[in-house]
Image (cartoon, rainbow, N blue to C red):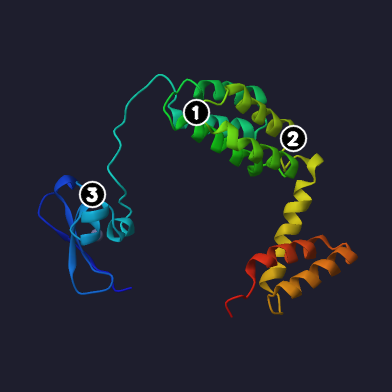
Amino acid sequence: MDTTAKSAGSGRDQANTAILLKSFSGESWYRISLGNRTCSCSQFVTDHSCKHLNALGIYGAPRPFVPKTHPTFSQALSAMVKSIRLRRMEDAIYWLMYLDTFKEPESRFRTARRILIGSAEDGHSIAVMEKVADSFKRINKPHAGIEELATELVKICKVPNWWNPSTGGHDYIYHGMVAQRQLWQLRMERSTENFTNMLVQAIVEQDKAKVLTAAMGFSLEDSHS
Ligand SMILES: [Zn+2]
């Protein structure tokens, strides 16, 4: 890529340092201020972000560090996610109660959304995923009772996660990886008909990897060719 950057300005202090970045498509140069995180291009004027800043890994304004004694909402949300992942039900409920002390309008939605994601993140129980997905319509509302969210947490934590040997998760992941490779090496037209035939054949042969190859294949059909 014909991208050239050069330093401009004489200040040694980063706040005063600017970079001139050549346009990705044309001959013009843009002036990027490292201290102010600004760019002189037209996209930045309207969006307050642009591809030039992104290319340099400069994202938004720096967030000030504020020392606090208690975890923030995001930190507590992260703690709840990790507790679910480890299937530590009581810890997860603790963090849920802590999250409930934040009364911003979007707090409940963010908590419920993470619970929904948690239902499918480390567990393979489709029954649990369906139940939580169904409850999500209720529990993401600001007025939803905290006990309703706790109920969903319990459903997730009561079923062991995929890496527990009792779930057969390793077998599933292994055959999924084999299936992925088979899909890459597939020498046939990626059509619904072909994948349907493959699925039927795989069930007859009780070939787990092939079943998953066919299942994944449906999302990769050559519809555009
Ligand atoms: Zn720009």
Quadrant of the drawing holding the N terminus? bottom left
**Residue at the far left in the pictured view:** 10
For the point 78% across and 52% down, which residue is it?
171
| Residue under numbered circle 1 | 142
Q: Identity of the amino acid at label 2?
A: Val
Residue 70 numbered mark, or none: none
User: Disc 2 versus disc 3: distance between alpha carbons?
Assistant: 47 Å
Q: Residues within 10 Å of mark 3 (few under 14, many from 20)?
A: some
Instruction: Mark 2 or mark 1: name the one nearer the start of the chain.
Output: 1
Q: Give the foreground label among 1 and 3.
A: 1
| Residue under numbered circle 3 | 37
Q: Quadrant of residue 85?
A: top right
Q: Position of residue 67 (x, y in %)?
A: 34, 24
Quadrant of the drawing holding the C terminus? bottom right
Q: Give the foreground label among 2 and 3.
A: 2
| Residue under numbered circle 2 | 159
Q: Position of residue 186 (x, y in %)?
A: 71, 75
Q: Identity of the amino acid at label 1?
A: Pro
Q: Give the foreground label among 2 and 1.
A: 1
Marks 3 and 1: in contact by CB < 8 Å? no
Is residue 55 among what the camera can see?
A: yes
Q: Position of residue 196 (x, y in %)?
A: 77, 69
Which image quadrant shows ligand 1?
A: bottom left
Ligand 1 lies under 8 Å from the Cβ of mark 3: no
Indicate left or right for 140 with 84 as reference: left
Q: Quadrant of residue 124?
A: top right
Marks 1 and 2: in contact by CB < 8 Å? no
Instruction: Mark 2 or mark 3: name the one nearer the start of the chain.
Output: 3
Q: Identity of the amino acid at label 3?
A: Arg
